[in-house]
Image (cartoon, rainbow, N blue to C red):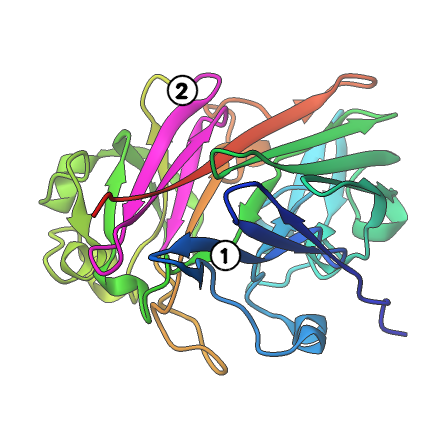
Amino acid sequence: MSPAIRTVTLHNSAGMRVTLMNLGARLISIKVPVKGELTEMLLAYPNLNDYLDDSFYVGAVCGPVCNRISNAQFSLAEVNYQLDANAGDHCLHGGDNGLSQRAWQIERHTDQEVVFTLQSSQHDDGFPGNRCFTVSYRLTDDNSLQIDLQGQSDQMTPINLTLHPYFTLGDSTAENLSLTLNSSSFLARTDDGIPTRDIIPASALGQDISSGVVVKALIANSQYPQIMSDSGIDHCFIVDQAGPNKLGAVLKSSTNGVTLRLYSNQPALQVYSGGFLKQPFSPSQGICLEPQAYVDAPNQPDFPPIFVQTGQEYRHNTILQFSIRPK
């Protein structure tokens, strides 16, 4: 039986509106006043029921471990945990019953804040522990959306949550948006998305991502073979000097003057230029900026660990700040 779909819309004194859905605790609309008109910032399905069959994680919270886990398994305390292999041989975004596919409880909401909660067990997704997840969205009057993701478990378990909205900033395609990243390096990966443990300097792209590059040009002029041959970017960038509320990325539209600044406490940012989007969308129609920990951390001993101890709180904070260039 399909879960009942519920939505909540937040609004602030500046006229910005944000709509959330309980399925996947996901962002389905961000509308910002641009030149007197509310303008959609996100890629979205035309109908709410389309989200029931979503295969692109549009706007969803992904976890309990986002991105890929190699060979859909990991070991913890000499126990091997087998997960859903839903991306070739690997587990993507928590598997077929990950957090993006679950109906969350709307715990409470006001005009400017909503809180979602979800209880999950090993029976649900194959990950150890009985876990409690909380996601809150708070819209402020300066057109910032503050997002707080939390998790706790009664057993040691890996947690790495991310957000998966596709940004358009009101343009018909993300290809013409300008992207700036606060990153000097990214994780080398295999063609199926698994880290090789090598760290690649961002200069290998052949362009200066620290000063703003148009997405289409970044891909077309890339000197990194995988980006040229892999339908765009789908790589994990390491945030320079990561810390609380650290600026990770800036996305700009030259068409309408909208700027998105993304701040987060996460050490990495997966950048996905939407090259594999299909109907009802088109490739590169939106771009994902996904704050998270390093990919496949449970199987990569050299990466910062993501295992959360019993009773310990996992905490992920992200801020999406929108502004309009003055006339």
Residue 241 pos. (x, y %): 34, 17
Q: Secondary structure at mark 1?
A: strand
Under mark 2, the amino acid is Ala
Tell me what residue is drawn at x 43 percent, y 30 percent: 263
User: Residue furthest toward the bottom?
Assistant: 279
Badge 2 or badge 1: first in the primary sequence: 1
Residue 242's disc is 2
Which one is in front, 110 or 193?
A: 110
Residue span colored magenta: 243-272
Would residue 278 be found to the left or right of residue 161 on screen? left
Q: In the picture, which quadrant includes the N terminus?
A: bottom right
| Residue with the mark numbered 1 | 31
Under mark 1, the amino acid is Lys
Tell me whether circle 2 and circle 1 mark residues in contact (CB < 8 Å): no
Which one is in front, 313 or 254?
A: 254
Is 307 drawn above or below residue 295 in the view shown?
A: above
- The image quarter containing residue 299 is top right
**Magenta stretch contains residue 260:** yes
Tell me what residue is drawn at x 48 percent, y 37 percent: 291
- Crowdedness near tag 1: few (<14), some (14–19) or many (≥20) residues, C-alpha within 10 Å: some
- Crowdedness near tag 2: few (<14), some (14–19) or many (≥20) residues, C-alpha within 10 Å: some
Q: Would you say the magenta stretch is mainly helix, strand or loop?
A: strand
